[in-house]
Image (cartoon, rainbow, N blue to C red):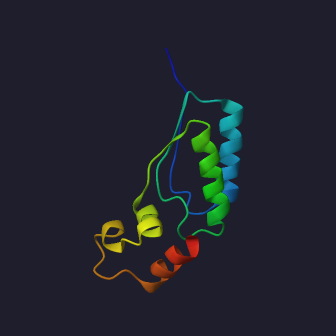
Amino acid sequence: MTAKIAVLSDCHGNAAALDAVAKAIRTERPDAVFIAGDLILNGPEPVATLDLVRELDAAGAKVVAGNTDIAVTDFDFAAAFPWMEEVPDSIREASADSV
């Protein structure tokens, strides 16, 4: 018995790339789709990317938040980037711009 599984992560707001993957998923019809985090931060099209993730989620994909998703949703930079003593302003600004 074999199963087709699609696993993707680190979309980082790249809606064009995610759209291409979503089309491949619709064509190949895997048995399961898993989307790991880092969905929208630092990307050119965070809203369009999130819309695509929501469509995949509604179709049954399992979605897990990543550290940058924590930064965007909760502004909890200490949890999102525990290895950084000080999170750069560019990340803070990108987080604010992504929502």
* Residue plotted at (44% across, 54% down): 65
* Residue plotted at (31% across, 72% down): 78
Give the residue at the far top of this rendering.
Answer: 1
The spot of residue 87 in percent (x, y) is 37, 80
* Residue plotted at (61% across, 65% down): 46
The spot of residue 13 in percent (x, y) is 60, 63
**Left or right, residue 11 beside residue 28:** left
Q: How many marks?
A: 0
The spot of residue 24 in percent (x, y) is 68, 39
The spot of residue 76 in percent (x, y) is 36, 71
Q: Considering only vertical position in the picture, is 10 above or below 20?
A: below
Q: Quadrant of residue 27?
A: top right
Q: Quadrant of residue 30?
A: top right
**Left or right, residue 98 beside residue 72:** right
| In-front residue for pair 55/1 | 55
Q: Quadrant of residue 28?
A: top right
* Residue plotted at (62% across, 37% down): 59
Location of the C terminus by quadrant is: bottom right
Give the residue at the far bottom of this rendering.
Answer: 89
**Left or right, residue 3 beside residue 85:** right
